Image: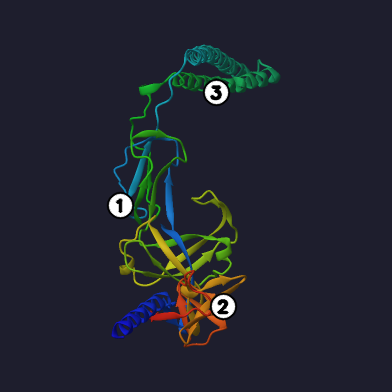
């Protein structure tokens, strides 16, 4: 009898063990409480710093530029620091045809000068003859042996000696033409390219050298960029925003900057361009981008170390709400076209559709469906369904 009772007890224990093993257990979940939260919505985008006003110094004339002694970072003072020196460049070498043309022009100018000198001698002889005739006519007229008409004709012939001055001027002109023809034959090192400096270019602003675009001695054309000058302390931030984000960004909106290697900086939106540009993303997708410019706020000491062209991460505030009922974003999921959460009540998960307002990366504004104090499941998995028993483990709020 006792043996039967022992075997019966063992059988009941075995059945109870199987029942306990197969009995469904609550699903362990992490939960958070719906509470009131300040929500700040930002547009986050990569940007870059740049100097607000950059002055590009270019060659004012064509010539040979002396080697620049300035380097990036060197300070300059407006109107005092000479940043470039230019002297005349040597004329180009002549090819065979150009040289023969120039030599022919020189020979023609030399022959024209000889002809002008001969004309000058003839004009002098005619002037001397007219002067002697006027003297003889005057003497005869004083004795009354010469007609008045003849005397006037002699005076007229003497006045016509102005042709001498014309011939002299013609000789001078032919001499200059000969000099010009000879100058056309000058080439290469025969020029005055090694003469004194004729143009010194001064710094257009006070600041420092940003980039040297042409350092070595060389022949430059007028307008050739030589270097860039700017004030490193006068910085602004340039951000290319998606057009869908740019519609929410207005002038004066506050922003913060980080990710540049220093402390977080305060800024505000100074300008948003009125037009967008089509740019291709790293994934090869065409996007409409709008350029926004941010002005830095706060003390200059906090910006020390931030230079021209540095990469930064910008966070532009586009909306702010205070003391709003909020649910963690990790609890949200799509239920058809609506948003929903799993609300925990009496140890079970209940599917709860909700209406949302603004949201950021951490919190979402709850407008309908939940009240502050409700407990929701974070990151619900596929084991969670409506009415499933759960074992909550609360996650503290930040």
Q: Position of residue 119 (x, y in %)?
A: 55, 14
The image's colour scheme reads: rainbow
Q: Position of residue 43 (x, y in %)?
A: 49, 67
Q: How far is mark 1 from mark 3, CA to CA?
A: 64 Å
Q: For numbered disc 3, what is the local secondary structure?
A: helix
Foreground pick, 396 / 130: 396
Residue 29 is at least partly visible in this image:
no
Residue 219 is at least partly visible in this image:
yes
Q: Position of residue 19 (x, y in %)?
A: 41, 78
Residue 207, located in which quarter of the rendered image?
Answer: bottom left
Reply above or below: 388 against 236: below
Foreground pick, 159 / 339: 339
Reply above or below: 68 against 248: above
Crowding around mark 3 (Cα neighbors within 10 Å: few <14, some 14 to 19, many 20+) is few
Reply above or below: 323 against 380: below
Q: Earlier in the sequence, mark 2 or mark 1?
A: 1
Q: Which label is found at residue 356? A: 2
Question: At 70% across and 19% down in the image, what residue appears?
Answer: 149
Foreground pick, 182 / 289: 289
Question: At 47% across and 12% down in the image, what residue appears?
Answer: 96
Choose mark 2 or mark 3, whichever is in front.
2
Crowding around mark 2 (Cα neighbors within 10 Å: few <14, some 14 to 19, many 20+) is some
Q: How far is mark 2 from mark 3, CA to CA?
A: 103 Å
Q: For numbered disc 2, what is the local secondary structure?
A: strand
Q: Earlier in the sequence, mark 2 or mark 3?
A: 3
Q: For numbered disc 1, what is the local secondary structure?
A: loop
Label 1 belongs to which residue?
73
Q: Which label is found at residue 165? A: 3
């Amino acid at each position: 009898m006792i043996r039967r009772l022992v075997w019966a007890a063992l059988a009941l224990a075995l059945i109870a063990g199987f029942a306990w093993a197969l009995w469904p257990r609550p699903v362990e979940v992490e939960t958070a409480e719906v509470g009131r939260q300040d929500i700040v919505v930002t547009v986050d985008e990569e940007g870059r710093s740049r100097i607000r006003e950059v002055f590009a110094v270019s060659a004012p004339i064509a010539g040979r530029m002396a080697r620049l002694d300035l380097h990036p970072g060197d300070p300059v003072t407006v109107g005092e620091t000479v940043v470039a020196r230019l002297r005349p460049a040597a004329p180009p070498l002549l090819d065979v045809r150009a040289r023969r043309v120039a030599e022919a022009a020189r020979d023609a100018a030399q022959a024209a000068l000889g002809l002008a000198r001969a004309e000058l001698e003839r004009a002098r002889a005619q002037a001397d003859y007219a002067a002697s005739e006027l003297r003889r006519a005057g003497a005869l007229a004083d004795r009354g042996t010469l007609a008045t008409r003849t005397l006037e004709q002699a005076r007229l012939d003497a006045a016509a000696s102005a042709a001498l001055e014309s011939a002299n001027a013609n000789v001078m002109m032919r001499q200059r033409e000969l000099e010009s023809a000879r100058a056309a034959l000058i080439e290469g090192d025969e020029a005055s390219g090694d003469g004194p400096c004729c143009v010194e270019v001064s710094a257009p602003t006070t600041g420092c050298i940003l980039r040297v675009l042409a350092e070595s001695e060389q022949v430059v054309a007028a307008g050739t960029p030589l270097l860039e000058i700017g004030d490193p302390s006068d910085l602004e931030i340039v951000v290319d925003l998606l057009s869908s984000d740019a519609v929410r960004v207005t002038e004066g909106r506050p922003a913060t900057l980080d990710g540049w290697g220093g402390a977080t900086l305060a800024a505000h939106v100074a300008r948003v361009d009125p037009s967008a540009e089509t740019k291709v993303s790293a994934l090869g997708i065409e996007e409409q981008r709008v350029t926004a410019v941010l002005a830095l706020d706060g003390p200059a000491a906090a910006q020390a170390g931030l230079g021209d062209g540095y990469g930064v991460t910008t966070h532009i505030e586009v909306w702010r709400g205070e003391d709003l009922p909020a649910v963690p974003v990790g609890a949200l999921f799509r239920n058809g076209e609506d948003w929903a959460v799993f609300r925990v009540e009496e140890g079970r998960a209940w599917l709860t559709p909700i209406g949302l307002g603004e949201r950021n990366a951490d919190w979402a504004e709850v407008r309908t469906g939940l009240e502050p104090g409700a407990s929701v499941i974070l990151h619900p998995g596929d084991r969670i369904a409506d009415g499933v028993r759960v074992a909550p483990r609360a996650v503290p709020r930040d």
